[in-house]
Amino acid sequence: MKESRLVRVTWGVIPVVIFLMIWEVVARLKLFPGQFFFPPFSTVVIEFYYLIANGVLVKDFLSSLSRVIIGFCAGSVAGIVIGILMGWQNTVNRALNPLISLVYPIPALGWLPLLMLWIGINEALPIAIIFICSFFPVLYNTVTGIKNVDKGYVRVARMLGASDIRILTTVVIPLALPNIFTGLRLEAGMAWRVIIAAEMVAIPTGIGALMMKAESLLRIDIIIVCLIVLSVMCLSFEKFFAYLEAKITAKWK
Amino acid sequence: MPVIELKNISKYICGDVNLKILDREFLVLLGANGSGKTTLLNVIAGLIDYDGSVLFDGMAMDNVPVNRRRVSYLFQDLLLFPHLDVVANVAYGLRTLKRPSEQIKTKVNELLRMMKIEHLAARYPNQLSGGEKQRVALARALAVLPKVLLLDEPLSSLDAQSAKYLRVELKQIHCKLGVTTVYVTHDLQEAEEMADRVAVIQNGRLEQVGTPEEIFFYPANRSVSDFIGMPNILECDYCHSIGHGLMEVVCGGLPIIVPHDGNSIRRIVLFPHDIYVSDTKPPGPTLNRFQGIITEIETAQEAVRIEVKAGKNKLLAEMPHHIFEGLNLTKGKDVFIILKLRRIKTYEKKDL
């Protein structure tokens, strides 16, 4: 067991290390055509340190992070609550499904021009975008999860005297959790992709805005630092929910 | 525990079913797949709409929802909650009734002990074997002290050995709790072993309701007889004990030895697959060995049926195709038949 774990970690790390080495060598030997725009990895690392030390990165990172967390939490909670209602009560499902089917295909960023005019350029704007981006997929996964619960379990619970609300809370929702978590996991990463795009276009603070500023100053190293931060955040958010899901359902899945 | 009455129940295949199930009775609903057994259980439980009326102790239950009927239903696919461990599964009904937690604990432990699954308490359903799941599901169903227990082929997915033990335990539990039980199966042996009374159902109609003996010795009609395996039913002319727990009964001129200790025998039943037919004189003692003549050979899909006239009796024997092909049997031929001693069923009473 121990060795297989070691092997797994090695396979995860070695290709990345090799890639970084090639990057460093290519940049230092100026092999890359537009080498002016291609800093070596070591320069990026040093810039990473400076950006953290002088607080610029931290400030922008925290504003992006807080937007993602607030928007994502609000969107997910709303998605889960309405999803449970739609999955459980067919009337609600029939009433809302046509509306949601119409709105769902619009990409979250498609709302940006409209929301810029409605909300204005302030903190509420990115949060609203993230809310929309999280809400629909979580909603869909929740509805699917609730609907996919074997009706047999509902029958058994009812036979054992359980009321509807008890069946919902003790049987249906727990059994729908894996599906709900799939939605959360996918959207946790997606929220970061969307916030960056929104900040690049419309909002003057955050990682995305920092990237745009760096672009105008031709600071490739800063752009790469931002991309690394973004990649790490997407990954760790997704992993966090995968871990939560495994933790909750490991015993019976 | 209630007397259950079904009055003019119609649903799906079932048409106009009337049935009275007695207090504390273990009634087996016996029928082929698709004959309407499960439908009747669902009607008793109140899981589906139906025409007609279901009465518990004379009270119409038709408008009482399933969670108020005090009925426990052990579904064929068990449906243990996968996200709850064994204790939580068994306790589910008790928690629903908002019993104090001490009481729930005591009750659950008692049930786990009764079903002999204490060692599984902390396991989840995906870590249980088929037989263990069966026991957990039964414990969960019994936890809520149901007045009526409905069992839908609960042992069909088990191996023969586990099923045998569980049958015995199920019967013991039934005696102990005295809960009115309806047990659905297509297995004749199961029905015979467990039932106080058997209700034979075919194509949604109750063909016969009676004790297992009545079903075997006095099948009401051809359809029941077919279902229980077309037994040869022989009237006894006279009988006498020959000691060692054996009795000689004479049926239509054949002196048949049966293991029996008690009063005179009135009828015996021989199943076709318990009669050997041979074209050569078999070795061994001449006990229950007779000569006869083949009057009919019928090839069915699953076996070959051979009618042999022996004494004044026409006996139906049955054998698999490959054995039939190894023998040289033709219509009109003289043959030997052997009746399996231990497989002969005997019936004492004269009238029903």
Image: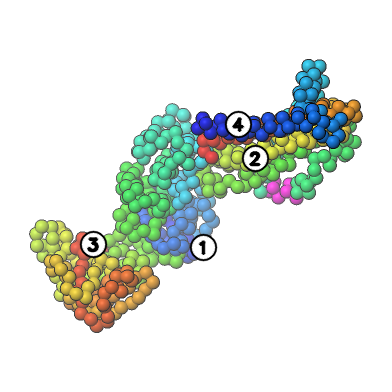
Residue in the image at 38% along x and 49% along y? B180
Question: Is A95 one of the magenta-colored residues?
Answer: yes
Dot 2 and dot 4 residues touching (CB under 8 Å): no
* Labels 3 and 2 in the same subunit: no
Viewer-nearest residue: A81 or B212: A81
| The residue stretch that appears in magenta | A91-99
Q: Please, what is the three-letter code of the amino acid marked with disc 1? A: Tyr
Q: Secondary structure at mark 1?
A: loop
Q: Which mark is residue B224?
A: none
Per the model, the C-alpha gap separating discs 3 and 4 is 69 Å
Main SS, magenta region, reads: helix
Q: Give the residue at mark 2.
A: A182
Q: Residue at x 21, y 67 (%)?
A: B339
Measure the alpha-carbon separation of dots 2 and 1. Answer: 40 Å
- Residue at 54% from the left image edge and 45% from the top image edge: A154
Report how far apart the C-alphas of labels 3 and 1 lie in the structure. Answer: 38 Å
Give the number of the disc on residue B12. 1
Mark nearest the camera among 3 and 1 is: 3
* SS class, disc 3: helix
Residue B70 falls within the magenta-colored stretch: no
* Amino acid at circle 2: Thr
Q: Check if mark 2's residue and mark 1's residue have beta carbons within 8 Å.
A: no
Residue at numbered disc 4: A10
How packed mark 4 is, by other alpha carbons closer than 10 Å (few <14, some 14-19, many 20 or more), is few
Q: Residue at x 58, y 34 (%)?
A: A8
Q: Amino acid at mark 3?
A: Arg
- The vertical placement of A133 against A215, above or below, is below
